[in-house]
Amino acid sequence: MGLTEWAYTLSESLLSDPLPRRWSHSLGVAKRARSLSPILGGDAELLEAAAVLHDIGYSPAVAATGFHPLDGARFLRDQEGANERVVRLVAHHSCALLEAEERGLRQELESEFELERPDLVDALLYCDMTTTPDGTPATPAERLDEIVQRYGPDTIVGRFIQRAAPEIHAASKRIGDRMADVSVGGQPM
């Protein structure tokens, strides 16, 4: 079984029944990842696998600390023996260090999981922050507004996402610029 096939099967088994909306979101994020293949080169499959797995830490079968990037990455590492790069992308997706800081878990996240290459971190962040909870496309601004509305501005998630907004916009611009370069004859990473 290939990396992406394994990732889809695992993510579906953990999310589709208990959290169908989260499963729809994960499918949308993976679809967005596939759309970035012109700039990903040999890392296209890796990013798609991380994209479909990025939220498995929400699964009741996986959740331990309540911080889904850490829970998902630990599960992938400890229970699945997953590809180390996929694990690192899941651990650090969408400015996870900032949320970990809000939760008092930054030290754990940093000490257990190295950062993946910045261009791939940007790509996964872009995919997540341009996909609604239902799996449809959105702008980063729409997605940020939706998250703040859903969680509230004074919650852990609300505070974290507002702090992360500048980096989310910057990463989205970097990915958009790279896609534009490739469409006019540039090369993938």
Image (spheres, grey):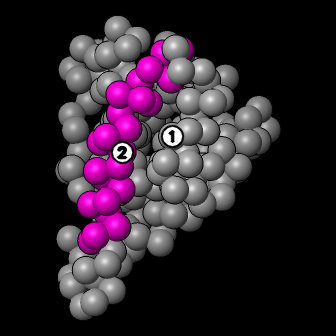
Residue at screen point 51% across, 40% down: 144
Q: Which residue is mark 2?
A: 168
- Mark 1, Cα crowd under 10 Å, few <14 / some 14-19 / many 20+, is many
| In this picture, residue 157 sits left or right of residue 124 | right
Please, what secondary structure does the residue beneath circle 2 have?
helix
Please, what secondary structure does the residue beneath circle 1 have?
helix
Residue at screen point 33% across, 74% down: 179
Asked if the residue under mark 2 is in contact with the one under mark 1, i.e. CB atoms within 8 Å, the reply is yes
Which range of residues does the magenta coloring cover?
155-178
Q: Is residue 15 visible?
A: yes
Q: Amino acid at mark 1?
A: Leu
Q: Which residue is mark 1?
A: 144
Q: Position of residue 80 (x, y in %)?
A: 47, 37
| In this picture, residue 129 sits left or right of residue 12 | left
Residue at screen point 36% across, 56% down: 172
- Please identify the quarter of the rendering in which residue 76 is found: top left
